[in-house]
Amino acid sequence: MGWRLLHEARKVSRRLSLVLSLAGLVIIGLICLGQPWIHFRVPLAPAGDAAGSQTIPINTIFFVRCSDISCLHEYDQNAYLLDFAWAFLLFASIASFILCIILINIIFFTSSNMPMLDFSNVIVSLLTGTSMILGILFYLMQAHEYLQEGMTYKLGCSFYLAWIGVFLFLMTGFFSYLNYMNFWSLLAIQAIWT
């Protein structure tokens, strides 16, 4: 049983990589299209005011749709870090889609062993994970620039989902690297000698 599983390890790891990359693609969609990133508490009065410390909650999401055309004419010149975050997460979503297409091609349509496709999976998954990390960091840097005295914040579920997505893409790259280096066949050769 173990011998057979060892010979099927390359196929299993590719299928596992496809599942991980599809889960990462879903996570990118979730974090970009509606889950809150940061929960701000904005004070209505200065600190130490006799009226008390009343605050308003503000939840931020990544892409905000505006139903009024006048929103398109209002561009904040200081939001350049947010533009970088959008660009990196857009690149991560495109790269993760390409990664899924390559893995589907390898699993279902390629009959021979092509190490260059595994190597391209390594590169694309590392680019996707790195782009997600940069998108997260630029978003947090932009939020830090808008913090004012007395404001507090707590990170939303999208922040944590994004780090889970980074982990999924890095694991996809790790499994693809093992396939590229023929790691599973090295284990099979050692299993013959023992």
Image (cartoon, grey):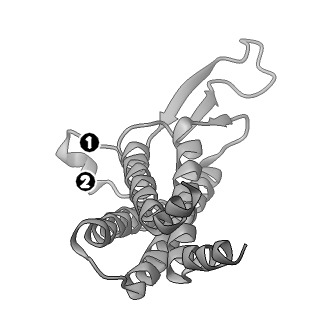
Residue 103 rendering spot, x and y as whole percentages: 34, 68
Residue 168 rendering spot, x and y as whole percentages: 53, 56
Please tell me which of labels 1 and 2 falls first in the chain.
Answer: 1
Dot 2: element: helix
Residue beneath the point at 50% across and 61% down: 4
Query: With respect to residue 185, does 39 lie above or below?
Result: above
The answer to which of 28 and 59 lies nearer the viewer is: 28
The answer to which of 31 and 73 lies nearer the viewer is: 31
Q: Residues within 10 Å of mark 1 (few under 14, many from 20)?
A: few
Q: Are marks 1 and 2 in contact (CB under 8 Å)?
A: yes
Amino acid type shown at disc 1: Cys
Residue 119 visible? The answer is: yes
Residue beneath the point at 59% across and 74% down: 188
* Residue 20, numbered circle: none
Q: Where, quadrant-wise, is the C terminus in this rendering?
A: bottom right
* Residue 72, numbered circle: 2
Residue 132 rendering spot, x and y as whole percentages: 51, 62
Q: Where, quadrant-wise, is the N terminus in this rendering?
A: bottom right
Q: Nearer the viewer, mark 1 or mark 2?
A: 1
Residue 78 visible? The answer is: no
Most distant residue in the right direction: 48
The answer to which of 19 and 23 lies nearer the viewer is: 19
Q: Which residue is labeled 1 in the image?
A: 66
Work out how far the residue at label 1 is from the one at label 2, CA to CA, in angstroms. Answer: 8 Å
The answer to which of 36 and 170 lies nearer the viewer is: 170
